[in-house]
Amino acid sequence: MCWTMRTPLGCFLLAGIVLLGLCSGCGRCPWDSAYLDLSAWLATYALPSEVIALAESDVACLDGRSTLAIPSGVDAFELLALLDAHRPDYIVGREGLVWDGLRGQPWFYERYEPVAVSRRVYPTAVALTLFAYSPSPFDRGANSPAPGEFATDAVVLRGYRLSSTTLTPGLPLYVALLWDDVPGRDYSGLRATLRLVAESDNREWYRSQASFQPSGLIWDDARLAQRYVVTIPDDLPQADYALRIGLTEQSGRPVPVLGDGDVADQELLLAEVAHPPDVARAPTPTEFAADYRLDTAQGPIKLVGFDAPSRVQPGEDVRVTLLWTTVGEIADNYKVFIHVLRKDGTLAAQSDGFPVFGLYPTARWQPGDFIRDEHLIAPVEDLARGDYTLVVGLYIEESATRSPVYDGDGARVPDDRIVLHEFAVR
């Protein structure tokens, strides 16, 4: 009997996953011949740094590779949570009810596809499938708890995932709402509405309504979800905005908000987001902090933060945003360089340009300004799968002289270029 799973499918998943741990290799590979084809495939196509998830009893079968051990005895929900937390590049699965069931789960089939199969029939029949990870835009960002709840006994809002808190015209914002249904209650008539409104005048810039569907994301017991692709118009003003969520019954009547919700609008404030200004008198939020000084003849320019991707797909542009500030007026116009370096240090792609797409060069900067400086790196050739490093600096175009760079401890940085970030192309 299965007490830990909520559905008959869950019981099948549990039974199948238990099979992962039935073979104890005691430090050796119990299925070495079955792993030969998979090992050959990985040696040809996979990068040395990529992680392969497989049963902990089989880890010795891929000796020398980075692995994520799947503990024996985990149930399906624990396994999905493990995969969501680590998102391994590959998963080795056994054919049978467990993997058939997993491939039917939205979170799994939207992110993993089979790329290789290995079968052995003697002395024991074994079939292994290698699944490769493809990122979903809804994976960006972290799970956040629900900011409140609605007065309904049919569903409970558990949390949400937001791809970014920064709005960039022309780039979509991905939002997932994660709900749990209440057993025995009908939620089919409920609809959730997501709105993007300006905080200054409550002007609406986006509205979309969605019904409930099986959750494709992991959040404790969340089994339902709505997903929204918020299109950011090109003319969106630089300002602060709010993402608000409302719930209505089939009749159109709003479902009241409990607690500290916005009772007047019958909405929850899901998150505060912003299209930050190019120039501000206070620092705007960035994903990563930085502490570097770049000397000029008139005084230092400081890099205090940046946004950069952790992963991009082959052929995709690389978008980098730098947050600069200065304590003095700068007489010269410095150019920004951003280089994408391969593992061996050679140049793979680059972007050179004046700050803020040339609209706010350094000669116009005022002391105390915080300048949000976006750069789009279009690879001159498709970046091959691999790991790359982003470096940045300033230089005078006429003399090709780089500004000296110092770290937070005052030490001169080699080559007068700041190592920003490593990212993967997969």
Image (spheres, helix red, strand yellow):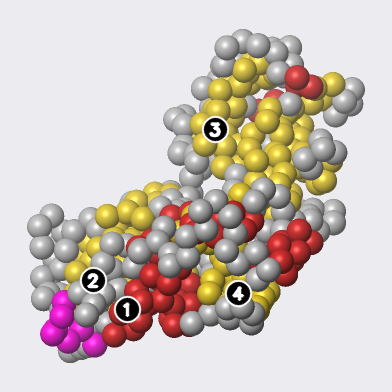
Rendered position, 262 above or below 17: above
User: Could you tell me if residue 329 is visible in this image?
Assistant: no
Callout 2: few (<14), some (14-19), or many (20+) C-alpha neighbours within 10 Å? few
* Amino acid type shown at disc 1: Gly
Q: Residue at x 56, y 42 (%)?
A: 307
Q: Do the residues labelled 3 and 1 touch (CB within 8 Å)?
A: no
300, 122: nearer the viewer? 122
* Amino acid type shown at disc 3: Gly
Callout 3: few (<14), some (14-19), or many (20+) C-alpha neighbours within 10 Å? many
Choose the circle earlier in sequence order: 3 or 1: 1
Kindly report which numbered mark, 3 or 2, lies closer to the viewer in this rendering.
2
For mark 1, what is the residue? Answer: 10
User: Is label 3 in a helix, a strand or a loop?
Assistant: strand
Rendered position, 200 above or below 264: above
Mark number displayed over residue 129: 4
Mark number displayed over residue 316: none
